[in-house]
Image: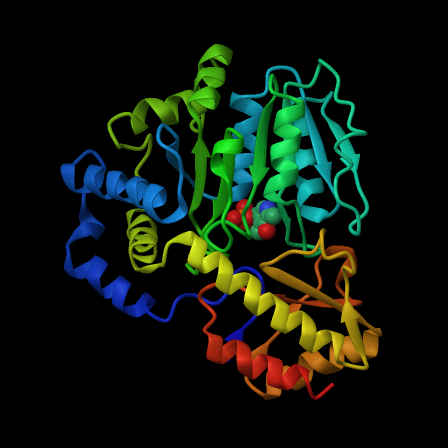
Amino acid sequence: MITFAPGPSKVYDKLPQYMQEAYQQGILSANHRSAVFMNLYQETETLMKEKLHLPEGYRLLFTSSATESWEIISQSIVQSSSYHIFSGSFGKKWFNYAKHIAPTSFAHIIAAEDTIDIEGLQIGENFDLIAITQNETSNATQVSNASIAAIANKYPEKMIAVDTTSSMAGIELDFKLVDIWYASVQKCFGLPAGLGVLLVSPKAIAKAKDKGETGRYNSLNFMLENAQTYQTHYTPNVFAIYLLKRVLQDMQEIQHVDRITRERMRKLEDAIANTTKFRLLIQNPEARSSTVLAVTGREEFISQIKKNAEKEGMQLGSGYGPLKPSSFRIANFPAITDQEMERLITFLKTY
Ligand SMILES: *Cc1c(COP(=O)(O)O)cnc(C)c1O
């Protein structure tokens, strides 16, 4: 059975080899204050720079999940409140976590079909951070690098944090545009769940210092202090970090991955456009995601196609939240091979 669910998603076929290597190299018992771990951390950060084009000066931090990053940002960086622009369930969840810590945070909800109206944006002085869900996995929409750049350009004095949980390592992101980016590894990194990555610029680090929040186990200042010497503030998931390093080592540079991701998405979209029973959930190509496709149709057809796909050894992703009965989703993540995607496309074409 191969899964096309957008997280947890299909892991890389080379995972058994990477896991074996981790064991054989003795890394699984390595102390996190030892040179072995410090080298692993440093190598992983260097690979993020080489393969994903993370700019110089940005730091890689390890978390347990993207959810943890939601909390870290509000707790350790936001000084008064955050302004959240979103169209779907993950953006909404982030806002709810933020509100719990900074109650005056604001939700600017847009329609899934719409791109952000940047000219019309009016974000007051009481908001020191803008929160953007770059790839909204629930409704398969995305915010372009150009939109992020325009928002950053309009509000140079505000910090911007971007959720790229289901796009980082699948498409090219222009990290230098803004200061905070995060993801977790069970999506485009093709790894088992349980590790998150948080990327922060020198400006974000300075803002955290200025806020001075400390004392919690995941206070950003505490994490950064340890990261200075490539250590972590608690005994980390060394196994998962090793697997992340190996995936980064073996992946092509992100501009190549990006091209393949976009080409494959075009083929998938064409296949759906040519069916009689289904259509793309998002009609606006400017708003549509490159890494996750959502397909809508009558409820009976949705449940039928999911069952038939299973019979063929393929698991489609269910719709998310309120979209569960009326849609299904397909992950277009790098760990899925071209051959597997071709098989799915051939199957979709029978509808
Ligand atoms: C999956 C996902 C999350 C949550 O990730 P966890 O690792 O479960 O915390 C957050 N945001 C987006 C956009 C996601 O796709």
Q: How many marks?
A: 0
Q: Residue at x 39, y 30 (%)?
A: 58
Quarter residue 309 falls in: bottom right
Percent x, y of residue 223: 38, 27
Quarter residue 127 falls in: top right
Left or right for 296, reference 263: right
- Residues 54 and 103: in front is 54
- Residues 30 and 265: in front is 265
Percent x, y of residue 24: 15, 61
Q: Residue at x 37, y 71 (%)?
A: 13
Q: Residue at x 71, y 13 (%)?
A: 125
Task: Indicate whether 232 appears above or below 262.
Answer: above
Task: Indicate whether 19 appears above or below 123.
Answer: below
Task: Indicate whether 200 appears above or below 173.
Answer: above
Left or right for 26, reference 60: left
Specify the color scheme: rainbow
Percent x, y of residue 84: 70, 32
Percent x, y of residue 219: 45, 24
Left or right for 75, reference 272: left
Task: Indicate whether 115 appears above or below 262.
Answer: above
